[in-house]
Amino acid sequence: MHKEFERMLSNNQGRIKYIASRYCQHDEFDDMYQEILLQLWRSFTSFKGHSSRETWLYKVALNTACTFVSKSIKHKKIKEVAPQTTNTDGSLGQESCQADILNNFMNSLNDTDASVLMMYLDGLSSENNAEVIGISANAVRVRIKRIKDAFENQYIGVES
Amino acid sequence: MKLDDLKQDWKKEVILTEPSQNLATITYELKKETAKLDREIKFRDFLEISISLLLIPFWGYQLLDPASSLQAIGLWLAIAVGIFIPYNIIKSKQVSASKTNCIRSFLETEYLKAVQQKQLLESIAWWYISPITLCIVLITLGARVDESGMPKINNGLIIYYGCLSVFVFAIYFINQRVANKKFTPLLKKIKQRLAEIND
């Protein structure tokens, strides 16, 4: 089970870190990240494969992030070995600029829309997205359309 | 630029992030931490419940030869309180939310749970502090009754009750503070997320 969990962690570390950084203040990142890892570990054994691994991961990570109350968790030992915040390679240029656009736009959304957008960008279908949030697939599509419009208004203006 | 163009950036930024090299250590620490947390939760539950329950035989033994009827009333009340307190704590913990549920149902259950726990802390005066204080007062007063059946209050007892009052108020205010500090922001956060989902 350890190996399987490590593989899952290895494939999803970026997602987990992104969720942790999106749903907390910078100084709370470590606590949030550790709490998400802990909850993933706790529910890993109960994952029965009824949904995809990504859907399961998003459910656990977003549910943990939703109810995270800072300073209530002190998992010092994990903190010592857990990696720090996301990409620190310092790469600049256009890529960084586009990444900034992604981050800025994500931060301008409310938490639910941000969750929907994350899963959309990650390639999850509207049905899977709906399964994670608990709304209908149609409602997800409407939200995505609204998010797309907001993005286009914000970054390229309304096209005539 | 369209929103779909961000999918490439998402891949670069998030999916292709280099995994850290210490995954085995993280997993090992997670396992250790989970076991530690489980032990702590079990110990806390055991402590909360056993303190009340373990005192019941003691009160029962005292009841075999009470100093007065006032003390006997206090002891009977202490036994009832010893049963009621663990019952109330267990009842408040019955709502449990699974993190593998969808966000909406998880939040709804979590909201109910937080409301129950907040109410439990806010109402601690009537279900925990008042009955225990009343038991202590009745048992101690009952131990000091004279032949006429009236309790004799001396300076020692007054100082004792004074300290007890300070202690009782401290417990009350600490619990009110925890209820506000821990649960008010949590409830606000959950309510806001639910409103967003229903939007």
Image: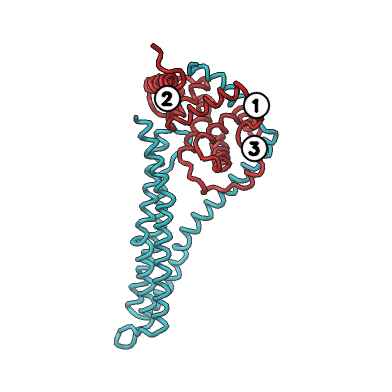
Chain colours: A red, B cyan
* Marks 2, 1: nearer the viewer: 1
The x, y position of residue A107, in whole percent, is 48, 31
Q: Quadrant of residue A145?
A: top left
* Amino acid carrying mark 3 in the image: Pro
Report crowding for label 2: few under 14, some 14 to 19, many 20 or more residues within 10 A (C-alpha): many
Q: CA distance from mark 1 to mark 3?
A: 19 Å
- Circle 3 is placed at which residue position? A83
Depth check: give the residue in front, A41 or B76.
A41
Q: Earlier in the sequence, mark 1 or mark 3?
A: 3
* Amino acid carrying mark 2 in the image: Ala
The x, y position of residue B71, in whole percent, is 36, 76
Q: CA distance from mark 2 to mark 3?
A: 31 Å
- Numbered circle sitting on residue A91: 1
Report crowding for label 3: few under 14, some 14 to 19, many 20 or more residues within 10 A (C-alpha): some
- Numbered circle sitting on residue B48: none
For the C terminus of chain B, give its image quadrant: top left
Which chain does the numbered disc 2 sit on?
A: A
Q: Are marks 2 and 1 on the same chain?
A: yes
Name of the residue lying farthest toward the right: B21
* Amino acid carrying mark 1 in the image: Ser
Q: CA distance from mark 2 to mark 1?
A: 35 Å
Helix, strand or loop under label 2: helix
Residue at 40% in and 40% down: B190
Helix, strand or loop under label 3: loop
- Circle 2 is placed at which residue position? A130
Name of the residue lying farthest toward the bottom: B147
